[in-house]
Amino acid sequence: MSTHAAAIDRQLLADGLLRCGPWYCTTDDGALVSHAEAQARHVAREASSLGDDVVLAYQRAARRVERHQLDAPTGYGHRGGLARMSCPMWWRRQLRRLNARRLEQRERVLGRVHVRAGVYVSHQGLAQRRAQQRRNSHAMQEVFATNQHGQEYSLAELAELGLANPDNRRAELMVRLNQTTEEAERLGHVAVFYTITCPSRFHPVVKNKGAPYPNPSYDGSTPRDAQAYLQGVWSRARAKLKRDGLGIYGLRTAEPHHDGCPHWHLLLFMRPEDRGEITRILESYACEADPGEIARRPGDSDAAAEKRRESRFQPIIMDPAKGSAAAYIAKYISKNINGEQFAGSSRYGTQLDKNGYHMDTAAPRVEAWAATWGIRQFQFVGLPSVSVWRELRRLSEQQVASWEAITHGGRLRFMDWPGRMLRPAPLGPLSAVDLDDWRELLSDPELLALGQPFHFVRHGQRQPRPAPLMPMVGDEWRQAIARIEASATMHGLRHAANAGRWDEFVRLMGGPMTKRDEQAARPWRVQRASDADSLDRDTGEIDRIARGRYGEPVAATWGLVVTSATGQAEYLTRLYRWEIEHKPSGDGFDLEGLTFDGSAVARTGVNNCTPPDAAPPRSPQQIFEPWELNAAYWYRRMNPAPDPENVRRLRLQIEHDAEQYRQASAERIAAAQAERHRLQSIRQGEDIIRQWLAAGEISMQEAAEVLTA
C-alpha cells in the first residue's frame, strides 16, 4: 500500500471511531449528560409500558446499549441489569468511558501520541482527565460524611487521608517493596527484574533515531488490547510455574511506551536454584507471539541478535552489591504516581524519564493514560493480602481489648494462686507454651469426654498452668481455644502493621508464596443491615437488609477473620457509622435557603453566627403601616393565587418541552459535528491529492478519479 493510501485509511479509521451508533463522540460533556439521561428515560418508559415482562424489557434495553457499542450489564439478573440500564448515572459512566477511549484512540491512530507530540497520552486526553479531576474534586467538596459521634468531614478531606492521596500511595508501596526485599534477603532468595513488551502490531508509532513515523505493522489495537495480551502471557506463565512447583513473589508494574502502548516491569524474588528455569519459562511465553520479529537474521552478530530479543523480553539479575532491588524500581513507582520523590533531588539519579521528560511533568500524563484506559499500574504477587494490613492499621490496642471483652467473654478467666480472681476475659496475648498446653488438652480424648475445661492458675513466679474450673462441652472448648489462639495471632499482626513492619506481617501471615486460604487472616465481609424495612424484589419478602441503588444487597468489609488451628474469630475494624449528605457549596443563589433572621443555618453542628435577640415575635400590625397593610390586601384581591393543578400541569408541560428541546439540540449538535468532520476529512484528502499531484507522485487522471469518487 502506498503512503497516501495508508494516510487515507488512517483518517477513515480515525473518523469511524467517533461514531458509536446513536452517539457521536465529542468533548462536550453537557451533551453527553443529556444523551445519557435521554437513553435512561427511554429504557424506563419502555420497561414501564411492558409491565411485568422483565425479560423482554431487559432484552430491548440491552439492544439499545449494544447499538451504542457498549456491553449490556450481565451477572446481575434481569432486574438488576434493567435497573442499571434505566439509570442515568450508569449511562453517564459508560458513555464517558467509551467517549474518552474513542477520542484518545483517534489521536493515537492519527499519530498524535508519541515522544514529539503528546507523550504517553494526547494533549486532548490530558485536558479531559484534568477536567474530570476538577469535577470530582468539586463533587467531593460538596458531599459530607457524619459519624455517630457527630464528627463531620467532607469527602475531599477524607480522601486526603487515604490512598487517594498519591503521597500516601507511594509511601505504602515503597514500605511494602522495601521490606519485601529485606524479607527475601533474610530467606536467601534472589531478585530478577524482567521487562516484557508487546509485539510491533500493538504500536502505532515507531521511534527510531530520527523522527517518529507511523508503524506499517500496526493493526489498530488499543492499549487495553495490549494490556489483555500481556495479562494472557502472564497468566499462562504463572500456570506453568505452578504446575512445575516454582514459587515467585514480588511486584508487577505497567507503564506506557511513548505511544501509549503498555509494557510490564516485574521485580520477582525466587529461590536461587529456580532462577534459570523461571527465566526460561517467562521468556518462552513472552516471545511466543510473532516470533519472526525477534528471530536472528542473516548477518546479525550475537549482540544484535540479543538486542533484538531483548526488545520483547529482558531479564536483569539484581546485584545486592550495587544496590537493593527496591531502590532500582523506586524510579518506576514514582514516575507512575506523581514523580515528586525526585523533584529537586539527584539522589536517585537523573530527574528525567527515558523520553527526556521531567518526572513531575511525565507523571500526570502517565496517570491520565492509566485512568483513560483503565489499566492497573501496580500489583503485588505471591504476598499476603494488603487489605488485611490496612484493616489492622485502623485499630488501637484499646479497641481490640474492648472488642475481645465483648465477644470473647465467657467461662475462661485468669486466676491468681490459690484461686483469687485476677481479671476477667479476654485472656489477651499468650505465650507459645500456653497455647501448646491448650492444644495438648484439646487433643486429649479422655479430658474432652469429661468436658472439664481449664483456666490459668499462677504458681508463684512460674508460668501459669491450666487447672480445672467448671464443666464445659466439647464445642465450647474448641470455640474458647480458637478465640485464645486468634487473640494471640491478632495482637501480633496488629503490632506489626501499626509499627510499619511489613516483613514481620508477611511472616505472621504465613510467609511469601502462602496460599490465601492458608493465611492467618482475611477480610470479614457481611451484608449491611438497614434500620427500615425493605422489599426483596425477587421473593417479595420484607427484610432489613440494606440495598443499593439497583435494589441489590450491599456487602461490605466490616473487619477481619483471624484463623487458627482450631477455628476462627471475627474482629470488627469499621468502628464508625457514616451518614452521607450532599450540601451544595453555595456558588449559586438559592432562593429557598434565603432568610432574613440574621442567623444562617450552620454547615456543621456548631453555629458561630451571632444569634438573634430573644425577643417575642411581632405581628404584621406592629411591623407595617396601615396603608401598607391595605395595599397588600387589595393586591391579594386583584392577584389571586393560581390554581395548584394548573400550575402542576404547566410545569409538566414546560419540563416536557424543555427535554424535547435539549434532545433535539443534542442531535443537531451531533449532526453538525459529524458534518464538519466529514467536510474536514474531504478537504484534508483533497489537499493531500493536490500535494501529490504537484510533486508528481500521481498523474492527473489518478487525481481526477480520486477527487470524483
Image: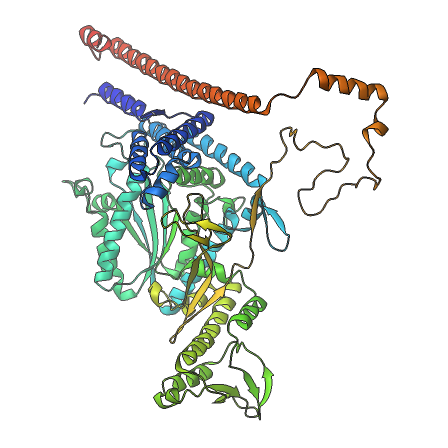
Residue 464 in view of the camera: no
694 vs 617, left or right, is: left
Q: Is residue 554 above or below residue 641?
A: below
Q: Residue at x 76, y 41 (%)?
A: 609
Q: Quadrant of residue 639?
A: top right
Q: How is the image coloured?
A: rainbow
477 vs 617, left or right, is: left
Q: Is residue 451 above or below residue 108?
A: below
Residue 221 rendering spot, x and y as whole percentages: 27, 35
Q: Residue at x 18, y 23 (%)?
A: 1
The single residue placed furthest to the left in the displayed view is: 298
- In this view of the protein, which residue sits in the foreground, 283 or 514? 514
359 vs 260, left or right, is: right
Quadrant assignment for the C terminus: top left
Residue 260 in view of the camera: yes
Q: Is residue 19 above or below residue 550?
A: above
Q: Is residue 438 above or below residue 19?
A: below
Tally of numbered tags: 0
- In this view of the protein, which residue sits in the foreground, 533 or 662? 533
Q: Quadrant of residue 664?
A: top left
Residue 25 rendering spot, x and y as whole percentages: 37, 26
Q: Quadrant of residue 610?
A: top right
Residue 481 rendering spot, x and y as whole percentages: 44, 78
- In this view of the protein, which residue sits in the foreground, 159 or 660? 660
